Image (spheres, grey):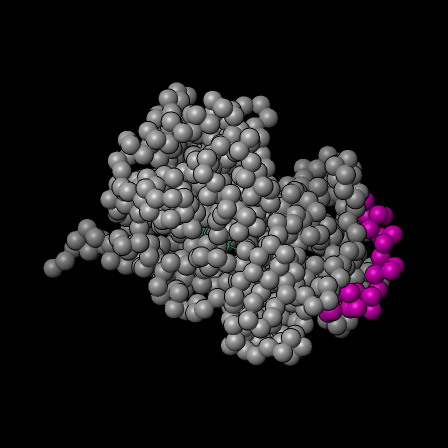
């Protein structure tokens, strides 16, 4: 009889769902990783990609890095020799300390992001980078910073969204520029299906969530602010404004109202491509309320994404769809909602005054400059796959005198360009905490097995690196368990880690929490600031404008490259079962565009931008995209869509405008 045990843990990927997991062990060895049937989100099933990867590449000894590696061939050759931790860390410490002596801590660039979003493995290494004053390559600039900056102007915070459970009281849920069918598979499959009211999706792509919705507004990319102003025009025309709410809780309605007469449904339909009847229907459902609004991250990765966010955020303010059951706006629910002390976790107090930070959009250029960049440390991130200007970035990473240190699970494109590669443990191999950015829960990540070979969790990697560099601040050496206990104690929920491990996930509040129920907002005026004096002081328009990007220049298409269902950012591209489902890297065009370009489905095409070119297989689909727009999902290994992205910034937060990229598509 074999001895079967179960370990409850949590998926720490950058995903709205934060699924509970059950790990099945037989005779001490992990045999299967499954969704936890008792977990309210997972309901017994992982998403397709994790079901494959956690039972595939992530537990495949042939794929996992198990020993520290030191480069033994030319840069980028992929030739490494195995080394002891002492030797690898000794070399890294010597090189990093030499850069500090020459350029100061700022000469060391720190890139990190969503490899794991568990709290310690995602946050503790920041103590090290704060202590040495490294240049922070601001993680959110490659993902969601425009939205953060926009919502901080409007609401004073971007991290206090609706509690998803309040959807039971909603007559309408609008999903605007998010694609739960890929990025939040369980919210798509269960939460949205169980919403009692109407579901409206606003997205240039007809993805599975749009397909399943009551109404899909398939607008042209970058026309969202114009659509929002048109909806406001209709709401005002039909007497659906909440005058009392506007008077008490909103600053700057006059600046918005003054712009509405021109934003007629005919105008809106013309610039957005959405038929008048659909605009009217969406306004009627949203305006009748109670209505909820989910602002996606894809939406703000546009040249005017910040303005779009500010414009859309006028909708709940104008209709009073805030501060009551079944209403609200959601972008992210941050750690502070769970009482998590991020400053303590990341060692904010260790940072020197004015620690430098740059945008990912500027990384390739900075890295190429020996007078400014002496070393790059990359952990939780495959920056050679996820960052813009991929060709230039990879060339800069291969610079002979740049020291590149990578902590990874796998030999990624970035690791291949490293001087030293440190093997990291996966989430199945150490204890941690996970906090969903959608649901108001807190979960345990529990160790289910030992890491392969000599791999170590990020925390221990950076404790050892700090020691090798002769750093002495005690916070750099605090133990995992002490940090977990302190975080839990400070959170004020009375949770012990042992209890959390036994239940997997704790629901922190028994009833739905209504955000902004007091009617006060953490803005300077205490109100929702549709007109933001702070934005004006920062050199931005006082209030949002009804902007719409025009169609792509003649001969070009607007390329959207958001998440697909089978990859998780730049992870899982090395899993054979996932590769099989993905097939060849592809791009989807509308049949009108394909016909105009003389192209046929299935043929290889050359996709080019001013910064790079790629060969992709052509797919043709009359409903997925509208004419003028192309779709190619992000996240492939090897050269990928980011070879085409020129690194343009959005209007706020020095953030990525990747979905504003225009490309040409031609026969090979
Ligand atoms: N074209 C295009 N590009 C995009 C986007 C887009 O929409 N279009 N989206 C952007 C967005 S939203 C984001 S967030 C970024 C994400 O970009 P990345 O952060 O680069 O992607 P991830 O796949 O989340 O994580 C990278 C690596 O972390 C590793 N990893 C996992 N767990 C651990 C661990 O415990 N320790 C260590 N050391 N490593 C670990 C994984 O093996 C993986 O290789 O990409 C951006 N790039
Ligand atoms: N399967 C899977 N899940 C993931 C990820 C993944 O890579 N794969 N990545 C994770 C990460 S890091 C993030 S940030 C989240 C992001 O998850 P989401 O918030 O869902 O954002 P995206 O998937 O990037 O893009 C969502 C939608 O934005 C749309 N969009 C693009 N331009 C515009 C526009 O101009 N207007 C409007 N209205 N919509 C537009 C795209 O067509 C896309 O359907 O997902 C997380 N979950
Ligand atoms: S990636 Fe998301 S959907 Fe998939 S298992 Fe993890 S939390 Fe669940
Ligand atoms: Mo992201």
Q: Residue at x 67, y 48 (%)?
A: 650
Residue 460 horizontal/vertical position (percent): 34, 34
Q: Is residue 606 above or below residue 15?
A: below
Q: Is residue 644 magenta?
A: no
Q: Is residue 531 above or below residue 301?
A: above
User: Which quarter shows the C terminus?
Assistant: bottom right
Residue 431 horizontal/vertical position (percent): 33, 41
Q: Residue at x 11, y 59 (%)?
A: 1
Pick out the residue farthest to the top.
472
Residue 499 appears left or right of 14: left
Q: Is residue 262 magenta?
A: yes
Residue 291 horizontal/vertical position (percent): 66, 59
Residue 608 appears in the picture as rendered: yes
Q: Residue at x 54, y 74 (%)?
A: 619
Residue 168 appears in the picture as rendered: no
Q: Is residue 522 above or below residue 622?
A: above
Instruction: Give the magenta-colored segment's residue range.
Output: 252-274
Q: Nearer the viewer, residue 28 or 663?
A: 663
> Can you tell which quarter of the image residue 642 is in?
bottom right
Q: Residue at x 78, y 68 (%)?
A: 269
Residue 325 appears left or right of 86: right
Q: Nearer the viewer, residue 438 or 593?
A: 593
Residue 223 horizontal/vertical position (percent): 73, 60
> Can you tell which quarter of the image residue 558 is in?
bottom right
Pick out the residue farthest to the left.
1
């Amino acid at each position: 009889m074999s001895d079967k045990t179960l370990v409850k843990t949590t998926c720490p990927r950058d995903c709205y769902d934060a699924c509970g997991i059950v790990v099945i062990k037989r005779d001490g060895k992990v045999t299967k990783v499954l969704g936890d049937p008792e977990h309210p989100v997972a309901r017994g099933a992982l998403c397709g990609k994790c079901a494959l990867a956690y039972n595939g590449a992530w537990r495949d000894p042939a794929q996992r890095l198990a020993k520290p590696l030191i480069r033994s061939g030319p840069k980028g050759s992929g030739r490494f020799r195995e080394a002891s931790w002492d030797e690898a860390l000794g070399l890294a410490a010597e090189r990093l300390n030499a850069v500090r002596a020459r350029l100061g801590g700022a000469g060391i660039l720190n890139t990190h992001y969503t490899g794991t979003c568990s709290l310690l493995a995602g946050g503790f290494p920041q103590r090290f980078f704060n202590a040495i004053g490294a240049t922070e390559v601001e993680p959110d600039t490659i993902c969601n910073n425009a939205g953060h900056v926009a919502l901080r102007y409007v609401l004073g915070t971007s991290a206090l969204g609706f509690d998803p459970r309040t959807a039971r009281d909603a007559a309408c849920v609008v999903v605007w520029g998010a694609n739960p069918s890929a990025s939040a598979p369980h919210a798509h499959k269960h939460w949205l299906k169980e919403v009692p009211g109407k579901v409206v999706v606003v997205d240039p792509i007809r993805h599975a969530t749009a397909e399943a919705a009551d109404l899909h507004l398939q607008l042209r990319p970058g026309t969202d602010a114009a659509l929002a102003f048109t909806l406001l025009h209709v709401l005002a025309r039909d007497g659906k404004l909440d005058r009392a709410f506007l008077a008490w809780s909103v600053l700057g309605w006059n600046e918005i109202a003054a712009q509405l007469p021109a934003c007629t449904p005919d105008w809106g339909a013309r610039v957005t491509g959405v038929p008048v009847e659909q605009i009217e229907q969406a306004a009627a459902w949203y305006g009748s309320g109670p209505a909820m609004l989910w602002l996606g991250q894809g939406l703000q990765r546009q040249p005017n994404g910040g303005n779009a966010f500010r414009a859309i955020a006028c909708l709940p303010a104008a209709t009073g769809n805030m501060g009551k059951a079944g209403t609200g706006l959601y972008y992210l629910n941050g750690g502070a909602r769970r009482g998590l002390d991020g400053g303590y976790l990341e060692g904010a107090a260790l940072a020197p005054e004015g620690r430098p930070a740059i945008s990912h959009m500027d990384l390739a250029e900075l890295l190429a400059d020996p007078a400014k960049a002496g070393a790059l440390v990359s952990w939780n991130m495959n920056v050679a796959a996820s960052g813009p200007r991929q060709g230039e970035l990879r060339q800069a990473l291969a610079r002979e005198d740049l020291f590149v240190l990578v902590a990874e699970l796998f030999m990624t494109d970035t690791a291949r360009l490293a001087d030293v590669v440190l093997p990291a443990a996966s989430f199945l191999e150490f204890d941690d905490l996970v906090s969903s950015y959608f649901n108001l829960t807190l979960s345990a990540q529990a160790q289910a097995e030992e890491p392969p070979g000599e791999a170590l969790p990020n925390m221990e990697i950076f404790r050892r690196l700090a020691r090798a560099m002769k750093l002495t601040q005690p916070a750099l050496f605090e133990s995992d368990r002490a940090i977990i206990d302190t975080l839990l104690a400070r959170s004020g929920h009375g949770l012990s880690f042992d209890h959390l491990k036994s239940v997997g996930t704790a629901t922190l509040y028994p009833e739905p929490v209504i955000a902004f129920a007091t009617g006060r907002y953490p803005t300077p005026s205490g109100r929702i600031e549709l007109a933001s004096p702070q934005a004006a002081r920062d050199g931005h328009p006082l209030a949002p404008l009804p902007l719409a990007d025009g169609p792509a220049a003649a001969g070009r298409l607007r390329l959207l490259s958001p998440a697909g269902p089978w990859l998780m950012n730049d992870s899982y591209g090395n899993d054979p079962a996932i590769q099989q489902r993905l097939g060849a890297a592809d791009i989807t065009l509308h049949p009108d565009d394909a016909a105009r370009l003389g192209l046929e489905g299935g043929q290889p095409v050359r996709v080019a931008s001013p910064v790079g070119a790629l060969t992709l297989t052509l797919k043709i689909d009359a409903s997925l995209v509208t004419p003028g727009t192309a779709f190619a999902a992000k996240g492939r290994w090897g050269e990928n869509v980011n070879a085409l992205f020129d690194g343009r910034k959005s209007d706020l937060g020095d953030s990525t405008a990747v979905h504003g990229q225009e490309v040409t598509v031609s026969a090979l």
